[in-house]
Image: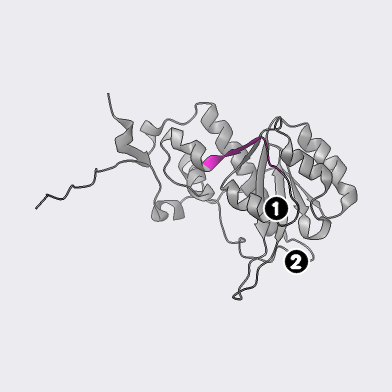
Amino acid sequence: MTDKTNYIVTISKTDLAVLPIASFVGNIIVVDSLDKVPSAVETLRASDIIGFDTETRPSFKKGQTYTVSLLQLSTPETCFLFRLNMIGLPESLRNLLEDKNKLKIGLSLHDDFHNLHKLEDFTPEGFIDLQPFVKDYMIADNSLARIYGILFSQRISKGQRLTNWEAKTLTACQQAYAALDARACIDIYRYLTAGEFNPWKSPYLQKVEPPVEEEQQ
């Protein structure tokens, strides 16, 4: 029997770069005022799974930082872009993030939670972090783009990551980028838990050579 501890699934930067670019297919709703929050939360609560991500305005000056600009929460069909720089973190949103009975999927959650705590104190519950989750499927990579590339042979473009997420109006490209990051978390989780991925058949399967032990003098 093959020892799976000697194998990992990982995609190189070169292999990732040649994959076709993924695109978001679904509805995108920008929530930029408090009156839009209740219906958005109601739709999210009706879903059996929610994809999660955040975006923060990048800083290009030493010592300058910004709080979270955008919270993306997605159902399989619709992604809501909550503009936190405009509406803050309303109680109904905090309650959703704290609901242990609502399954929420994200990646590198520690960083997202740390940044959201700068807005409001809350206790996140019901979350699954894909970084440790994918290890059970022999996937060694940690980034959303690499995991998505391994599973779906498509590349999530990061061209919008360093744009201004506090702009008066988010561009169509910004909206599509942000929505895909959240929905991709759902796609990855569902694909893996449905048993669709066989690491032994992945073109990115690699054997890990054990380290060479130095001879004792």
Residue 210 versus residue 68 in the image, above or below: above
Q: Does the magenta stretch include residue 75?
A: no
Question: In the figure, is residue 63 to the left or right of 167?
Answer: left
Q: Quadrant of residue 185?
A: top right
User: What's the amino acid at mark 1?
Assistant: His
Magenta part of the protein: which range? 123-130
Q: Quadrant of residue 98?
A: top right
Give the residue at x 67% y 64%.
57
* Mark positioned earlier in the residue sequence (1 or 2): 1
Residue located beneath label 1 in the image: 117
Residue 177 in sight? no
Residue located beneath label 2 in the image: 167
Residue 65 in sight? yes
Residue 178 image position (x, y, % from top left):
66, 53
Helix, strand or loop at label 2? It is: loop
Question: In the figure, is residue 45 to the left or right of 110?
Answer: right
Classed neighbour count for the residue bearing mark 2: other residues with Cα under 10 Å, few (<14), some (14–19), many (≥20): few
Residue 108 image position (x, y, % from top left):
56, 48
Q: Disc number at residue 180?
A: none
Classed neighbour count for the residue bearing mark 1: other residues with Cα under 10 Å, few (<14), some (14–19), many (≥20): some
Using the numbered discs, state the Cα–Cα distance from disc 1 to disc 2 in whole angstroms: 22 Å
Q: Does the magenta stretch include residue 124?
A: yes
